[in-house]
Image: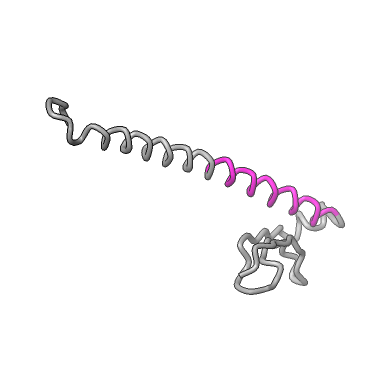
Amino acid sequence: MSSLLEIVELESGEIVLRRADGVGSPLVEIKFSDEVRVLLSEFSLDIGKAMVSAGVQAVGEVYGHVLEAHEDRNESSAVAEEYDDVPGVLH
């Protein structure tokens, strides 16, 4: 599976984030209404790229918080395991 991604505008006018090798369906799809496409004219791809980039950045931040929480839980359980066999330690 390709790890390279690309943002492209399809013939339908949709802007998608997809794997560069074209395998699978798009990961993200942005579809502007006809009214908005007229308003944005040739800048719709630029706006779509900015929207996808902001979304990817937000996912990265959320994923970072999830990883930190997971690591904190693993560290806490590792510390607790050190004292499992110690007499007189309440669990």
Q: Quadrant of the N terminus?
A: bottom right
In the rendered view, does 89 fall on the left or right side of 41? left
- Seen from the viewer's position, the closer of residues 53 and 12 is 53
- Picture coordinates of residue 10, whole percent (x, y): 75, 69
Residue at 41%, 35% in the rendered image = 72
- Seen from the viewer's position, the closer of residues 36 and 4 is 4
Q: Quadrant of the C terminus?
A: top left
Tell which residue pokes out farthest to the top in this image.
88
Residue at 74%, 48% in the rendered image = 50
Please tell me whether residue 42 is drawn above or below residue 13 in the rendered image: above
Q: Quadrant location of residue 37?
A: bottom right
Please tell me whether residue 34 is drawn above or below residue 78 in the rendered image: below
Question: Which residues, given as a range, are shown in magenta?
Answer: 43-62
Total labels: the figure holds 0
In the rendered view, does 82 fall on the left or right side of 8? left
- Picture coordinates of residue 82, whole percent (x, y): 27, 34
- Picture coordinates of residue 86, whole percent (x, y): 17, 30
- Seen from the viewer's position, the closer of residues 81 and 13 is 81
In the rendered view, does 57 fall on the left or right side of 13? left
- Picture coordinates of residue 84, whole percent (x, y): 20, 35
Q: Quadrant location of residue 54?
A: top right
Tell which residue pokes out farthest to the bottom in this image.
23
Which secondary structure type mostly characterizes the magenta part of the structure? helix
In the rendered view, does 82 fall on the left or right side of 68? left
Q: Is residue 61 magenta?
A: yes
Residue at 37%, 40% in the rendered image = 74
Tell which residue pokes out farthest to the right in this image.
42
Q: Is residue 42 magenta?
A: no
Q: What scheme was used to colour the molecule?
A: one colour
Tell which residue pokes out farthest to the left in this image.
88
